[in-house]
Image: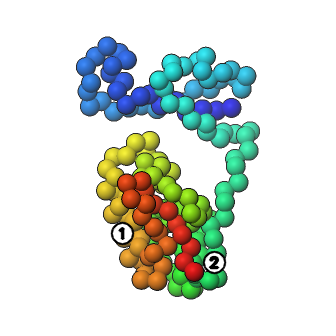
């Protein structure tokens, strides 16, 4: 079993130094599958499981191809269309749409979206997500923009348009 270990936000406190603006480094540690992560690392480190060679990746849910709404997202081809009309999306807009539509009705926090779409473990600026959602809604058009619903003070969710 592979894990990614991320240090806490204030690593300088661990080293007995005052907080600084140093960048964090992510380390990949390989350990036997029988090893317990809690025995290997300090309790204030964040540990996430990462699929590696020899492990089976979980099946990705298929984004909806909803004839009623006309929205089709193809994550393998990085294409999205509404009623057969291709959408001109940036890489991040497509990633955001694909992730939201793959998990309909599930509320995603801004921090979660930043991690899965942008690849950051922390929110650099939550307005980044808001700006991309606004651009994506404009590109979806007046009928489909309501499919991306705002959950105030939490984040966003995809609700299929009926």
Q: Position of residue 43 (x, y in %)?
A: 51, 21
Label 2 crowding class (10 Å Cα cut-off): few <14, some 14-19, many 20+?
A: some
Is 161 placed left or right of 132 in the picture?
A: right
Q: Position of residue 121 (x, y in %)?
A: 44, 41
Identify the residue at the far top of this view: 16
Looking at the figure, which quarter contains the N terminus?
top right
Query: Where 104 sits versus 109, above or below?
Result: below
Q: Residue at x 61, y 16 (%)?
A: 39
Identify the residue at the far front of this view: 152
Do the numbered discs 2 and 1 sit on residues whose CB atoms are within 8 Å? no
Label 1 crowding class (10 Å Cα cut-off): few <14, some 14-19, many 20+?
A: some
In space, the residues marked 2 and 1 are separated at their CA atoms by: 22 Å
Between residue 47 and residue 56, name the one nearer to us: 47
Can residue 130 be seen here? The reply is yes
Looking at the figure, which quarter contains the C terminus?
bottom right
Quadrant of residue 84 within the rendered picture: bottom right
Q: Position of residue 74 (x, y in %)?
A: 61, 70
Mark carried by residue 66? 2
Between residue 51 and residue 44, name the one nearer to us: 44
Give the secondary structure at mark 2: strand
Is 68 placed left or right of 131 in the picture?
A: right
Q: Residue at x 25, y 19 (%)?
A: 18
Between residue 68 and residue 91, name the one nearer to us: 68
**Which comes before the other along the chain, label 2 or label 1?**
2
The residue labelled by disc 1 is 134
Q: How is the image coloured?
A: rainbow
Give the secondary structure at mark 1: helix
Q: Residue at x 35, y 15 (%)?
A: 15
């Amino acid at each position: 079993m592979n894990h990614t270990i991320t240090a806490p936000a204030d690593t300088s406190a661990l080293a007995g130094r005052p907080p600084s603006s140093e960048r964090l480094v992510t380390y990949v540690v390989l350990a036997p599958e029988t090893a317990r992560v809690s025995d290997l690392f300090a309790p204030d480190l964040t540990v996430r499981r990462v699929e590696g060679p020899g492990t089976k990746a979980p099946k990705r849910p298929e984004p909806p191809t909803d004839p009623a709404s006309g929205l089709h997202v193809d994550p393998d081809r990085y294409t999205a269309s509404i009623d057969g009309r291709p959408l001109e999306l940036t890489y991040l807009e497509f990633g955001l749409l694909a992730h939201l539509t793959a998990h309909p009705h599930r509320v995603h926090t801004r921090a979660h979206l930043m991690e899965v779409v942008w690849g950051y473990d922390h929110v650099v600026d939550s307005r980044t997500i808001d700006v991309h959602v606004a651009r994506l809604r404009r590109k979806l058009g007046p009928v489909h923009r309501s499919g991306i619903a705002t959950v105030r003070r939490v984040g966003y969710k995809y609700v299929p348009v009926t």
